[in-house]
Amino acid sequence: MKQKLLTALLCIMLAAGCACGFAACDNDVGSGNGDQISTPAPDDEKPGEEEPEPDSEPHEHTYSEAWTSDGTYHWHAATCGHADEVSGKTEHDFGAWEEKFAATCTEEGLRVRVCRTCGYEESQALSALGHDIVEHAGQAATCTQAGWEAYETCSRCDYTTYAALSALGHDTVYHAGQAATCTQAGWEAYETCSRCNYTTYTAIPEAGHRLVPHAGQDPTCTQSGWAAYETCENCDYTTYQALSSLGHHYVNGACDRCGASDPSVSPEPDEQLVYRFNGSGYIVTGIGTMSDAVLTIPSIYNGHPVTEIGESAFAGITWLSDVTIPDGVTSIGTEAFNGCTGLKSVVIPDGVTSIGGSAFYGCAGLKSIDTPESVTSIGDYAFYGCAGLESIDIPEGVTSIATWAFQNCTGLKSIVIPDSVTSIGHYAFSGCTGLKSIVIPESVTRIPEDAFAGCAGLESIVVEEGNPVYHSAGNCLIETQSKTLLFGCSNSIIPDDGSVTSIGSMAFSGRSGLKEIEIPNSVTSIGERVFEGCAGLESIVVEEGNPVYHSAGNCLIETQSKTLLFGCSNSIIPDDGSVTSIGDMAFKGHSGLTSIVIPESVISIGGNAFSDCALKNVVFENPEGWRDSWGNEISSEDLADPASAAWILSGSNGINRMD
């Protein structure tokens, strides 16, 4: 049944197609617009050609319903096999242009229009626009920010000629630190940039005065006095005000204030000692006719007690060997026994409260001295140069060990500092070459860097626990807060735990037994004359990574300034350009140094750089153009001669090459 229905449907569709496209025509080809058939005239015939036989049946052209088109026309093409026949041929009826793709700066666009009759689409390219250029000024790069060159952009697209300039980075300049003073702020070592305002500057606030009170001193007839005043431990600040001396007031041949004899009255003859009355007792002021080596000073004279050993009373009396000072004496004056080189023993009674400055200065034969507990004050230089003195007990009442008090006491092996002492003065034990050990009590809160300078034999430094200012480690005395190594021993090992960042001036000065030293990378500041006189020093090593210093050829070098700060007796100055100057006193006191080569890179040699050395042979790689510290030219011939050059450097106050 289905097959019959399909057959019927096909027949109906075929009949309909024939009805639409079928038209009656004969053998002639019809006109392009479907008009009447034209028959050619007889004169159209060509000789020799046979006239075609007419179709047996007339033919009607058929045309497609679909349009055929070209760029100008559209038409219905014949479907009957007569390809030349068309129907309805007309020009396109285009609508308005429509943009299909917009033109860009670099690519063409496209627009189209469509025939409203046949749908034919005509396209047309749109020219690329080209860039709409915008100029941009360049921007120079800075140390921290990138810049750019002058460039172009397009206002319509992302076109650009932008080229970045990398940031320059800082051009750093090193600046040495400046310690703060009592009244002025300082700063740590820092860097700046030569191009911008970059800096690592860190200010150190001013320290303020560290005041020490001083009792006043009433003026006497012959000496001025002073009002109570204050000084600063760290600088020269003082409120000191002098009080003028009173002058003598003579009554009955003597001054009623001090007992001095009236110069118009002749003194009593043949007195062994000379005295001066002070209103209540007598002061021994000098030697009369006394010539004994053993002296016992009387406790009573002329019915009054002897209370003082006066200023310079026995100064320079070299034949004195033993002195006994009587009970009742309360003070030993300034320079009382100065220069008594033959003095071997002194008995000081209980009751003496002060020993004046330079009282026993230069008493090289003095081997021991018993200092009573009553003494509370020992003056400057009191025992300076007492080379034979092997020990001394400082009384518990003493609060300050004065400046230079025991300097150059070369025989001194040990000393006990009592808990009452709070400060030790400058150079107090300087030059005590026999001193082996020292214990700093927790009470001591002030020790200057030079207090133990030149203590060649010092092997042990111990600070008692609980000291608020100092501690010891590796046989080094360290100021805890500032992390400064104040002084060390011949066997010191500088701590590398960060507790030491600076080494104070003269810290190892005179340590002739010091053989080697290693500077940790934490140390960024080294003071002056640190290794002066270290004649046995053979090795200086700076730990790698130190930001300020390095070592080479057993020389300590400040890297940034290219300055050789300190050397050894076996140093070889680097000739790679890392050293351009040799610092003041760099090799001072290295008695084992006999020869040295000065590289061509060195253009400056500091004052006393080679003093107290044993130089015999000095080679200047460039002996030309040197001048002394006064600007006088030094003969190149002299510097070219090794012996002459050694002589010049040994006594030089500094020379410079003037290129």
Image (cartoon, grey):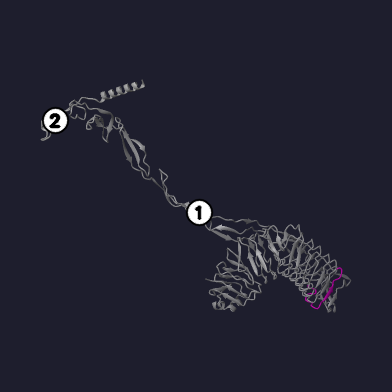
Which numbered tag is attached to residue 167?
1
Q: Which residue is mark 2?
A: 40
Q: Is residue 229 inside the magenta stretch?
A: no
**Viewed as shown, does residue 27 lie left or right of 211?**
left
Q: Quadrant of residue 18?
A: top left
Q: Residues within 10 Å of mark 1 (few under 14, many from 20)?
A: some
Q: Quadrant of residue 417?
A: bottom right
The amino acid sitting under disc 1 is Ala
> Which of 356/437 is in front?
437
Q: Residue at x 30, y 23 (%)?
A: 11
Residue 587: % across, % down:
63, 71
Q: Magenta region, mostly helix, strand or loop?
A: loop
Q: Quadrant of residue 361?
A: bottom right
Q: Residues within 10 Å of mark 2 (few under 14, many from 20)?
A: few
Secondary structure under tag 2 reads loop
Q: Is residue 313 inside the magenta stretch?
A: yes
